[in-house]
């Protein structure tokens, strides 16, 4: 079984690219190949005209993975001093701590930190080499809402310095808000590539949200143009290719009220593209 097949991807300098897809889509494997951790059976990878190993050794690539790279008994500053010592022209450790928002944690041991705080340490480790490219795998896992917001503010500061960013995430709102470009993977292949606006525009239709006590779900799902029906108590979410006819049915045949109609968001687009790919398989 192939984890990744036929992926052809070029990332331009200065881009912020989000890699999306369900579990098993091939995101992590793609990143591992990009970083030289896994060798592809066919094809090649180049980073700034070099092999991944050469580019990383030259300090051109900073990496923030979900796990690993942490010496639990070390203090935060000690770990960053160690990483900085591996590079020719590192960022001063104090600056890396400040940019990652963990200056107050410098003298604490890694084993005493929360999962979200350890992610911020990994971010500091990724930028201490002053890399041209930052690769992030699920960077905000374990962070609360405020920490995630602060993390992306820090990342914006790095991209403002001209760095290129490639990140894999399950948080679609992060991709929508922060990525210049979205690459959607499924079953080891790229199935969509474009801006968030382009990805959303590729999926027609709208979502109707309405309170419908005692709704006949089977009848609603059978309406022409209704792609999907979800229930949350008496509240229905209907994804529709023809929202006008669906709305007329609700008003004429059901006690629907508190009705809202919204255009497709990124989640709708990802689900619709996934369903289309399944139908083609």
Image (cartoon, rainbow, N blue to C red):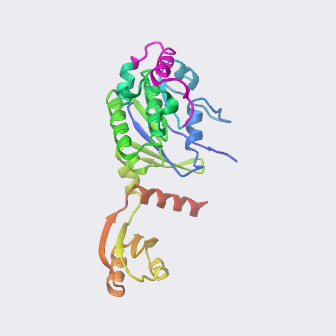
**Whole-percent x and y of residue 141?**
47, 43
User: Taking 117 as reference, is 79 above or below it?
Assistant: above
- Answer left or right for 180 relative to 26: left
Main SS of the magenta part reads loop
Residue at 57% in and 32% down: 68
Q: Residue furthest bottom?
A: 253
Residue at 35% in and 81% down: 250
User: Taking 254 as reference, is 124 above or below it?
Assistant: above
Comparing 115 with 266, the one in front is: 115
Q: Residue furthest right?
A: 1
Residue at 50% in and 19% down: 83
**Whole-percent x and y of residue 52?**
56, 26
Residue at 48% in and 19% down: 78
- Answer left or right for 186 relative to 76: right
Q: Which residues are magenta?
A: 67-93
Q: Which quadrant of the view contains residue 104?
A: top left
**Whole-percent x and y of residue 35?**
56, 30
Q: Which quadrant of the view contains residue 159?
A: top left
Comparing 5 with 262, the one in front is: 262
User: Do we see residue 12 in this rendering?
Assistant: no
């Amino acid at each position: 079984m192939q984890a990744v097949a036929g992926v052809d991807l070029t990332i331009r300098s200065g881009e912020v690219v989000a890699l999306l897809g369900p579990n098993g889509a091939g995101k992590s494997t793609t990143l591992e190949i990009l970083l030289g951790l896994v060798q592809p059976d066919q094809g090649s990878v180049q980073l700034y005209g070099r092999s991944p190993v050469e580019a990383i050794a030259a300090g051109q690539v900073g990496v923030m993975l979900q796990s690993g790279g942490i010496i639990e008994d070390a203090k935060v500053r000690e770990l960053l001093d160690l990483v900085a010592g591996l590079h020719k022209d590192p960022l001063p450790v104090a600056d890396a701590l400040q940019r990652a928002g963990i200056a107050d944690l410098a003298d604490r041991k890694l084993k005493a930190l929360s999962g979200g705080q350890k992610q911020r340490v990994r971010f500091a480790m990724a930028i201490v080499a002053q890399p041209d490219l930052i690769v992030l795998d699920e960077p905000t896992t374990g962070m609360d809402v405020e920490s995630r917001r602060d993390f992306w503010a820090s990342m914006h500061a790095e991209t403002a310095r001209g760095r290129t960013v490639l990140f894999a995430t399950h948080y679609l709102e992060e991709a929508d808000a922060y990525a210049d470009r979205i690459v959607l993977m499924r079953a080891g292949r790229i199935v969509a590539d474009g801006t968030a606006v382009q990805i959303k525009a590729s999926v027609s239709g709208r979502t109707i949200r309405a309170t419908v006590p005692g709704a006949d779900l089977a009848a609603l799902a059978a309406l022409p143009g209704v792609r999907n029906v979800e229930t949350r108590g008496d509240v229905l979410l209907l994804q529709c290719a023809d929202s006008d006819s669906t709305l007329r049915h609700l008003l004429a045949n059901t006690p629907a009220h508190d009705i809202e109609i919204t255009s497709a968001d990124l989640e709708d687009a990802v689900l619709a593209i996934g369903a289309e790919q399944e139908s083609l398989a």
